[in-house]
Image (cartoon, rainbow, N blue to C red):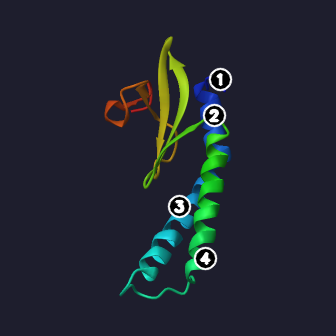
Amino acid sequence: MGLFTLAEARAELARLRPVLDEIVTVRADMVELTAALTPGGEPTSLGGLPERKAAEARLNELMTEVQQTGAELKGIAPLLVDFPGELDGVPVLLCWLEGEPELGWYHRTGLGFAGRRPLPGHA
């Protein structure tokens, strides 16, 4: 997979929104089902072990779908998606975190989340 321009990364993020939204839902279901299956856990109307296994399989499918775009899924709770790109000739990761309205951050490759900065013109 090649590098994303900012416009391509934003377009891909928009296309992935339904997938990302479903990851959030399935992730929550899985946590609830897992808690219900632990000894002394609160029962849930979501089901039991078969539903837990189905949720886990679906989550894996969704995560694969994100990664097949060339984006990097760096975190699941919260969701953190990086799009490899370049900024002024420097390799960067265009970075989206769950809850952010759009792709507005980047960090240099190798610096990780702590090195995140707002994209120029995006304060």
Helix, strand or loop at label 1? It is loop
Q: CA distance from mark 2 to mark 1?
A: 8 Å
Foreground pick, 38 / 117: 38
- The amino acid type of the residue labelled 2 equals Gly
Foreground: disc 2 or disc 4? 4
Q: Is residue 72 above or below residue 35?
A: above
Foreground: disc 4 or disc 1? 4
- The amino acid type of the residue labelled 4 equals Glu
Foreground pick, 106 / 70: 70
Per the rendering, the mark at residue 70 is 2
| Contact, mark 2 vs mark 1 (Cβ under 8 Å) | yes
According to the picture, the residue beneath numbered tag 4 turns out to be 51
Q: CA distance from mark 4 to mark 3?
A: 16 Å
Helix, strand or loop at label 4? It is helix
According to the picture, the residue beneath numbered tag 1 turns out to be 2
Per the rendering, the mark at residue 117 is none
According to the picture, the residue beneath numbered tag 3 turns out to be 24
Foreground: disc 3 or disc 2? 2
Q: Is residue 77 above or below residue 118?
A: below
